[in-house]
Image: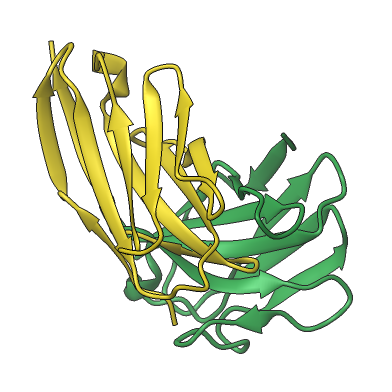
Chain colours: A yellow, B green
Amino acid sequence: GENVEQHPSTLSVQEGDSAVIKCTYSDSASNYFPWYKQELGKRPQLIIDIRSNVGEKKDQRIAVTLNKTAKHFSLHITETQPEDSAVYFCAASIGNQFYFGTGTSLTVIP
Amino acid sequence: SAVISQKPSRDICQRGTSLTIQCQVDSQVTMMFWYRQQPGQSLTLIATANQGSEATYESGFVIDKFPISRPNLTFSTLTVSNMSPEDSSIYLCSVADRGLQPQHFGDGTRLSIL
């Protein structure tokens, strides 16, 4: 089955700096890549997603890039704010199955 | 997106008992899933709840331990049977319309077994 690796496991940045989280996947059949943000004690919430026919997608301060050849995709958060502090999960999807990464705990230091 | 209500939000149970978790959606959805998330860990898929037929379980999860029902397109239940402390976790339901679409999660059920 699909194997998704996510790095780093923890990330601390100064407010206003950028944060980058990277994921790799193993199955070239994966064709949909969502990113979720989970605040402490809350549900995972979709923040951005990208399909395999697109190389990059941006939504305000958040962007995702996809390199199908190398089988990796990344989340970029610019101008970070304290409210961006949370755990972020990437996922790769084959059909209806989602395979989640291990999560990145992001701390934005005011 | 759909509004997902999950009950109970938390419970403390005795070893050897069973608990049924409910997931109600305010609109019909094609896909419903059940996940387990242990503290500080990622999400692990338990099974896909199939409307009108038996759930599809992932490796390491069996129907006798985690029976699932899905009587219609808006409702599903997950039962955690014969609980042990190792079952202490957060259980989440999620829904999706079809492939290449995001899954949306309920608030989860925080389960502790004494």
Residue sitting nearer the eye, B81 or A36:
A36
Say left or right for B35 vs B86.
right
Say left or right for B68 vs B26.
left
Residue sitting nearer the eye, A49 or A99:
A49
Q: Residue at x 33, y 39 (%)?
A: A75
Q: Quadrant of residue A10?
A: top left
Can the viewer see residue A64?
yes
> Is B11 above or below relative to B26?
below
Residue sitting nearer the eye, A88 or B13:
A88
Say left or right for B57 vs A76.
right
Q: Position of residue A3 (x, y in %)?
A: 35, 73
Q: Residue at x 55, y 61 (%)?
A: A31
Q: Quadrant of residue B70?
A: bottom right
Q: Residue at x 77, y 72 (%)?
A: B69
> Is B113 above or below relative to A65?
below
Can the viewer see residue B112?
no
How many marks the image carries: the answer is 0
> Is B50 above or below relative to A67?
below
Q: Position of residue A44 (x, y in %)?
A: 47, 42
Quadrant, the C terminus of chain B: bottom left
Residue sitting nearer the eye, A78 or A13:
A78
Q: Position of residue A16 (x, y in %)?
A: 18, 11
Q: Position of residue A8 (x, y in %)?
A: 15, 49
Q: Residue at x 19, y 23 (%)?
A: A18
Quadrant, the N terminus of chain B: top right
Say left or right for A104 vs B114.
left
